[in-house]
Image: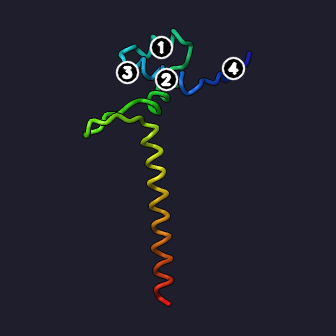
Amino acid sequence: MGRTNKKYDEDFKKNIVKLIENGKAISEIVCEYGISRSLVYAWKEKFGTITTSEGTITCNNDIIKLQKENRLLKEENEILKKAMAIFTKR
């Protein structure tokens, strides 16, 4: 028999992460919901919350999005600097 890839919606994943953050053991979650341990850890990494030094709470997914946006903005800034250098030489 072949394995079927079951799809889980984002709300389900976030609820699993909330269970972990509220102290439920990952082994219990794996048995209760019939999902793999590696999926649970991946969801925890993606949707887990982080408390910053300022006391705000954010999730890993938001941090990853901000890092991508920051990288893109840095690239755009470098392009603009090079274009400015080219046009000011004339």
First in sequence: mark 2 vs mark 3: 3
Q: Are the residues flagged by discs 1 and 3 in contact, CB closer than 8 Å?
A: no
Nearer to us: label 1 or label 3: 3
Q: Are the residues flagged by discs 2 and 3 in contact, CB closer than 8 Å?
A: no
For label 4, the residue is 3
For label 1, the residue is 29
Nearer to us: label 4 or label 1: 1
**Colour option used:** rainbow
Nearer to us: label 2 or label 4: 2
Nearer to us: label 3 or label 4: 3
Instruction: Using a 10 Å C-alpha cutoff, classify the residue at mark 4 as few (fewer than 14 neighbours), some (14 to 19) or many (20 or more).
Output: few
As shown in the figure, which amino acid type bears the numbered disc 2? Val
**Looking at the rendering, which quadrant does residue 60 occupy?**
top left
At which x and y percent is residue 27? 45, 13
First in sequence: mark 2 vs mark 1: 1
Q: Residue at x 27, y 35 (%)?
A: 55
For label 2, the residue is 40
Marks 1/3: CA–CA distance: 12 Å
Marks 2/4: CA–CA distance: 18 Å
First in sequence: mark 4 vs mark 1: 4
